[in-house]
Amino acid sequence: MQKTLIVCAMEKESKLIAQKLKLEQIEKNLWKKENISLLISGIGKQRTAISLTQYLCENKNVDLIINIGYAGSTDIPVGKWVNISKSYNHEWEIPGEEKYSFIDYGNKNLKQVNNKDIDVVECYSAESFVTKTDLTGHIAFDMELHSIAVIGDMYNIPVMSIKKISDNLSLNDYYENTENNQNVFELDSCLEFLNL
């Protein structure tokens, strides 16, 4: 039986997912049931890297990591689910290396949801909320996925990510939509894409 780890940054992203999957709370930021675990990593690439690495050191048998959460976008409609195909580090600009991606880890294509009704886009993980960008195209921005992709590569675990668009590069809209707009706030509808 495949062992799946769901990673969400915040409790508000994970609460309804844990309830729908009937997961039991084991620790403050960890829920489990048979072959499914849900980890609240904390916001940002560093907290995510620390939480996920600690989890994987203590739990060796993970077959798939699924990242679920909110993302901003340049032009994707708010409330729409997207399937992330590739993750980039928004701040990574080192001479001699490709902009936005490490040479050795975190640059593989992510595993895709088997559903043609969900758009496939790339995601740039930033250290802080993105409110403007020179990047163009149909893309998403988050604050955790690239760390998950790097660690998935290091541990040789496939990573899948689905994101719900919370805003179009507006911090005010993010807070308004994730607190007051039920269509955006709820994330448990992603389970219809996952077959868990």
Image (tube, helix red, strand yellow):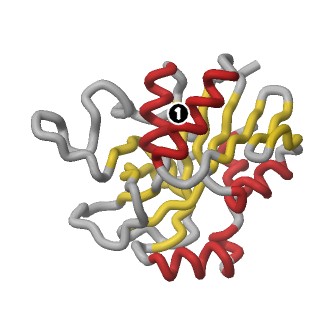
Q: Is residue 3 above or below residue 145?
A: above
Q: Residue at x 63, y 73 (%)?
A: 178
The quarter holding residue 170 reads bottom left
Q: Residue at x 44, y 49 (%)?
A: 120
The quarter holding residue 1 reads top right
What is the tally of numbered marks visible in this picture?
Answer: 1
Q: Is residue 22 above or below residue 64?
A: below
Q: Can the viewer see residue 172 in this picture?
A: yes
Q: Which residue is mark 1?
A: 159
Mark 1 residue type = Val
Q: Can the viewer see residue 112 in this picture?
A: no
Q: Position of residue 69 (x, y in %)?
A: 59, 55
- In-image side of 154 versus 70 (left or right): left
Is the residue marked by circle 1 packed among few (<14), some (14-19), or many (20+) residues within 10 Å?
Answer: many
- In-image side of 74 versus 16 (left or right): left
Q: Position of residue 187 (x, y in %)?
A: 68, 59
